[in-house]
Amino acid sequence: MAGGTLAASRSDNLHSFFKERLERFGFSGVHVTSVDKDGLNSLINELKPRFFLIESDFYSCMTIMIKELHKLFPKLNIAVVSLSRYPADKAMYCVINGARSYVNLLDGLAEFNKGMGEVLKGNGYISPEVQRRIDMRSFYPEPSGDLTDYHVEIIRLVCCGFTGKEIADELHRSERTIDNRKTEIYTALTLRNENELIRDALYLGIVKQDELYFFPRSYALKPLPKDDKRRLRKTK
């Protein structure tokens, strides 16, 4: 299928429909999949498609996934296709992180068809709404950043249920400093709150489930060391 089209969709029951629609647009050698992130990398290596079309809600942390794909396959023509409402800010970062195109059905059928036509020609296309969001910025947004070990430790404590004050006490920092670092984390991962952070940290493997330990508030909070020596200090 080298030079064909790979499409990623979580809607298994609609794969045949998507394949038919893409072929009507003119895409050839269409293969639709719902494999996970690691399986997707292997499939791209195997099929070597010219086009890679992915639904905007295929993956919980799309911007990070696109950044990784763009790094692994810099020549791959990545197009994000949105068939439902998706936050324009997050859509913007799909483009910033390496997607050549972002096509949105909610822009209207005519605009959607125009966008798909541009993708087929190998051109870049950005949904007008997403382009407006980019233009509204006083500077061009930076790609999602990398996390330091310090950031990862804060993420681990958040996932363990620590509050901002408890994290500050544990790491011997001020609450303001912890809040600033959490803001950096949200920006790097293109997230909005702690719920999204916990979900994506576990999904991306930033924090492993066996690293999560929840302590009753009657005990002083002490995260489990890497060597698995569990200790709790009773508070007075």
Image (cartoon, rainbow, N blue to C red):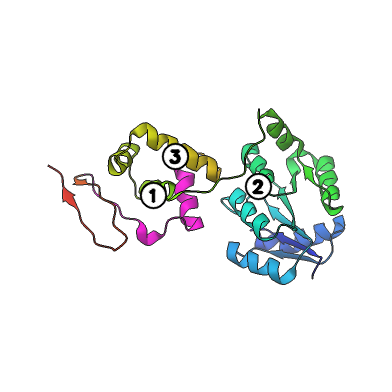
Label 3 vs 2, first from the N-terminus: 2
Q: Is residue 55 left or right of residue 153?
A: right
Q: What is the crowding at mark 2: few (fewer than 14 residues within 10 Å), some, or many (at least 20)?
A: many
Coordinates of residue 202 in the picture (x, y in percent): 46, 55
Instruction: Check the picture and name the quadrant holding the C terminus.
Output: top left
What residue did someone put label 1 on? 153
Q: Which mark is residue 97?
A: 2
Which amino acid, by three-letter code, is at mark 1?
Glu
* Residue bearing the label numbered 3: 182
Q: Which residue appears at 79% of the width and 39% of the height?
A: 108
Q: Position of residue 74 (x, y in %)?
A: 71, 57
CB contact under 8 Å: marks 3 and 2: no
Check if residue 195 falls in the magenta segment: yes
Q: Which residue is at a point 35% across and 56% down the rendered structure image?
A: 212
Q: Give the structural element (helix, strand or loop) at label 3.
A: helix
Q: Tag 2, which secondary structure? A: loop
